Amino acid sequence: MATLYTIRELAKEFDLTTRAIRFYEDMGLLRPERQGPGGRNRMYSARERARLRLTLRAKRLGLSLTQAKDIIDMYDSPRDTAPQLEKFIEVLASHRQQLESQLEEIQANLDEVKQHEREAKALLTKHTTKNKRNNAAVVAD
């Protein structure tokens, strides 16, 4: 008999809320079996558990849920794996480009902040030195 997981078991295992898992279901990332009266109980197979793991991995990589779904769904199809891998590489390359662009922007902002910080420190030093001279002149009088 195949192992089945409840929504609570998966939520606990992956440190998620049951609401998040239901959201992934609404997005089409998960398709649990329905059991019990009126099909109220969701039961997740090992396959659905693996899809959840892949979804969370895609999120950690910064992919959108739509991108994650497209990639994960490709593995459900009986097609050759080469097009699947090509699509995955394409998505990863695009995402890497976005991250590198963001990194460049962050580095430019950081450089600007460092420059302002140096200028402010120089002004403060100048101001402090001027006040010390003024105080010394007052004492000398």
Image (cartoon, helix red, strand yellow):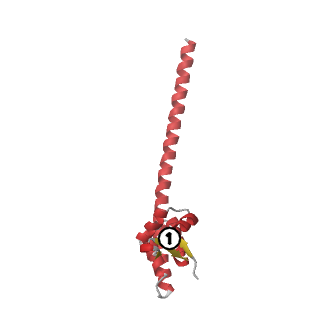
Image coords of residue 64 (percent x, y): 44, 67
**Is residue 28 something that shows in the picture?**
no
Looking at the image, residue 34 lies above or below residue 131:
below
Name the residue: 57% across, 81% down: 2
Q: How many marks?
A: 1
Tell me the quarter of the image containing the C terminus: top right
Image coords of residue 121 (percent x, y): 53, 37
What secondary structure is found at the residue carrying circle 1?
Answer: helix
Image coords of residue 81 (percent x, y): 51, 85
Q: Quadrant of residue 49?
A: bottom right
Name the residue: 50% across, 37% down: 120
Looking at the image, residue 134 lies above or below residue 103:
above
Q: Nearer the viewer, residue 125 or 26?
A: 26
Label 1 Cα crowd, 10 Å radius (few <14 / some 14-19 / many 20+): many
Looking at the image, residue 75 lies above or below residue 66:
below
Image coords of residue 139 (percent x, y): 57, 14
Q: Nearer the viewer, residue 139 or 79?
A: 79
Name the residue: 45% across, 65% down: 98
Tell me the quarter of the image containing the N terminus: bottom right
Q: Residue furthest front?
A: 37
**Residue designated by label 1:** 55
